[in-house]
Image (cartoon, grey):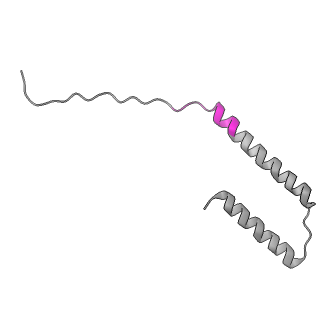
Amino acid sequence: MSIGLISLAAGVLIGLMYAVLKVRSPAPPALALIGLLGMLAGEQATRHLLSRDAAPPPQVTVPQATSQTGVSS
């Protein structure tokens, strides 16, 4: 299962529990969404920078095998 789907399911479950228990969110909804957007943007930027700075994978060359027919000259 995708990490995004797990996160969405966890958020919905927590939201349902908040509603049942009549607990107010610790942050105003707009402020919380802006914070989540910042977290996602930071994660994507970090992934982009790390993948750009990573060394390219080494090139592997495989030598051609010579065929041997078993006939001597």
**Relative vertical location of residue 27 with respect to residue 21 in this rendering, above or below:** above
Callout count: 0
Tell me the quarter of the picture where residue 62 sits.
Answer: top left
Residue 55 on the magenta segment = yes
**Relative vertical location of residue 19 with respect to residue 71 in this rendering, above or below:** below
Tell me the quarter of the picture where residue 47 sits.
Answer: top right
Residue 17 horizontal/vertical position (percent): 81, 74
Residue 1 horizontal/vertical position (percent): 60, 62
Looking at the image, residue 58 sits to the left or right of residue 7; the answer is left
Magenta region, main secondary structure: helix
Looking at the image, residue 53 sits to the left or right of residue 69; the answer is right
Q: Residue at x 90, y 73 (%)?
A: 23
Residue 66 on the magenta segment = no
The residue sitting at the top extreme is 73
Q: Residue at x 7, y 24 (%)?
A: 72
Q: Residue at x 46, y 29 (%)?
A: 59
Tell me the quarter of the picture where residue 19 sits.
Answer: bottom right
Q: Magenta segment, which residues?
A: 48-57
Residue 58 horizontal/vertical position (percent): 49, 30
The residue sitting at the front extreme is 30
Q: Quadrant of the C terminus?
A: top left
The residue sitting at the bottom extreme is 20
**Relative vertical location of residue 54 with respect to residue 32 in this rendering, above or below:** above
Looking at the image, residue 66 sits to the left or right of residue 41; the answer is left
Residue 25 horizontal/vertical position (percent): 90, 66
